[in-house]
């Protein structure tokens, strides 16, 4: 019985950590999306680090010409040999040198913004 209860507690702790991690990713995604200026009304933009090698840009908007909701997700796979990107489920392609410089710069801005926001939150806690 003791092992069973320990297992339940460990499972509950793991679920709680997963929920906290998910909440942090959503918060960071929102902060990252703000790096690129205001989002059009009815739209949504997110930019975040998913794991050690993966960054995600997701944007949703209303097409002005058709009124239809559009969405595009771009995944960036960061490897020692370079950065690859895939848009809308297409195969990965290497970033051009200009794209790589822009990506590196926005990752720096993201890091500054997220670290600054967490520092601010800790000071007010």
Image (tube, rainbow, N blue to C red):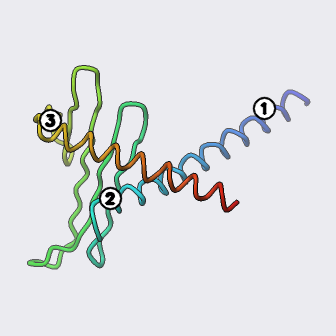
Residue indicated by mark 3: 95
Q: Is residue 21 above or below residue 121?
A: above
Indicate the position of residue 98 as horizontal and vertical percent values.
Answer: 11, 40
Q: Quadrant of residue 68?
A: bottom left
Task: Identify which residue is drawn at 16% across, 79% down.
Answer: 67
Q: Earlier in the sequence, mark 1 or mark 3?
A: 1
Q: CA distance from mark 3 to mark 2?
A: 20 Å
Residue indicated by mark 1: 7
Left/right placement of residue 3 relative to residue 105 reads right
Task: Identify which residue is drawn at 61% across, 49% down.
Answer: 20
Left/right placement of residue 89 relative to residue 109 reads left
Q: Earlier in the sequence, mark 2 or mark 1?
A: 1
Indicate the position of residue 97 as horizontal and vertical percent values.
Answer: 12, 34
Task: Identify which residue is drawn at 22% across, 56% down.
Answer: 72
Indicate the position of residue 57 as horizontal and vertical percent values.
Answer: 29, 51
Q: CA distance from mark 2 to mark 1?
A: 42 Å
In which quadrant is the N terminus drawn? top right
Is disc 3 surrounded by few (<14), some (14 to 19) or many (20+) residues within 10 Å? some
Q: Earlier in the sequence, mark 3 or mark 2?
A: 2
Residue indicated by mark 2: 35
């Amino acid at each position: 019985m003791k092992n069973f209860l320990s297992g339940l507690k460990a499972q509950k702790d793991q679920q709680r950590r997963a929920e906290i991690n998910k909440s942090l990713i959503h918060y960071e995604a929102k902060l990252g999306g703000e790096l690129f200026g205001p989002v059009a009304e009815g739209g949504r933009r997110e930019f975040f680090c998913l794991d050690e090698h993966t960054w995600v840009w997701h944007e949703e908007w209303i097409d002005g010409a058709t009124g239809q909701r559009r969405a595009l997700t771009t995944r960036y796979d960061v490897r020692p040999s370079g950065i690859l990107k895939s848009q809308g489920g297409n195969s990965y392609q290497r970033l051009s040198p200009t794209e790589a410089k822009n990506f590196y710069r926005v990752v720096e801005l993201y890091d500054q913004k997220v670290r600054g926001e967490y520092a601010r939150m800790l000071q007010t806690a």
